[in-house]
Amino acid sequence: MRRILIAVILLFVQFSIAQNVVCSEEDKLAFELKTKEIKGLSDNDFGKTIIDVGKTFLGTPYVAKTLEIGEKESLVINLQGLDCTTYVENVLAFSILLRSENFDFDTFTTTLEKIRYEDGKLAGYSSRLHYFSQWIANNEKKGLLKNITAEIGGKEITKEINFMSSHRDLYPFLANDDNFKKIKKSEDYLNSQPICVLAQDAIAANEEKMQSGDIIALTTSIKGLDITHTGFAILEKDGRIHLLHASSSGQVEISELPLADYLKKIKNNSGIMVARPY
């Protein structure tokens, strides 16, 4: 009887976990193909590993709001269409799998959950790290990366973060009052913490302190918002740091212009935050 009870409990746990993951057959196949594609790309320099994995996504279409599906928050696996954040998350997750030489799908979903959600646990819509400055801080807390913005010349600023609660109509899940209250609570916490930013006009002078594989988050002067875009630093043949990213212009690509020049063309950009994955 005890063995039967244990078996039933394990089956229930596995079913519950499966219910929290949304992954099409096409994306499951894409995962299997990606694991084969990246084998052999591991390097002692984790930044190089990240770039090599990131390049395997070149040409992947940019698709916005891929996580905003269903009636409840689930761990969405979408490797066929990426926005800037899901691109960074998936590249980091695959790089971690590659380093550990463990290409099991369940390990991948666990790793992605750890990266995407506060303290590594999916616990509803508000547990997703919606604001990227919060994403950086929480993943630093988990030991996955280090915020090096201050080390490369960044300065602390204070800014009120409230874009989501101030634009409730843009986020379907915020129609739920409980979700709204929890997001507001997250914003209140963010507003109690300073943000370190390397100003746009200081990037070129501090560019040599960045490395390929560093996570670059673009800060903004837009009211209530911290970050508008993200990607990876990549040192190109011209000796300059460029941006490897899922561009809203259409696909995963490497910026033609060096990062410092690329940012000057982005309206409302105020600078960057930089985080180095361990």
Image: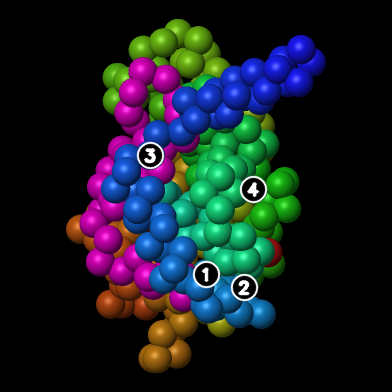
First in sequence: mark 4 or mark 2?
2
3D distance between C-alphas at marks 3 and 1: 23 Å
As drawn, is 218 to the left or to the right of 144? left
Task: Identify the amino acid type marked 4.
Answer: Asn
Structural distance between the alpha carbons of marks 1 and 4? 16 Å
Q: Which mark is residue 139?
A: 4
Label 3 close to label 2 by CB (< 8 Å): no
Measuring from the top left, give residue 8's x and y in whole percent.
64, 18
Nearest-to-viewer mark from 3 and 1: 3
| 4 relative to 264, above or below | above
Image: magenta residue range: 52-81
Residue at image mark 1: 50
Which marked residue is nearer to the observer: mark 4 or mark 3?
3
Cα separation between marks 4 and 2: 16 Å
Tell me, yes or no, whether the highlighted magenta stretch contains residue 60.
Answer: yes
Q: Amino acid at mark 3?
A: Cys
Q: Residue at x 61, y 60 (%)?
A: 102
Look at discs 3 and 2 and give the one toward the viewer: 3
Q: What residue appears at the point 76 percent right and 12 percent down from the top-left corner?
A: 1
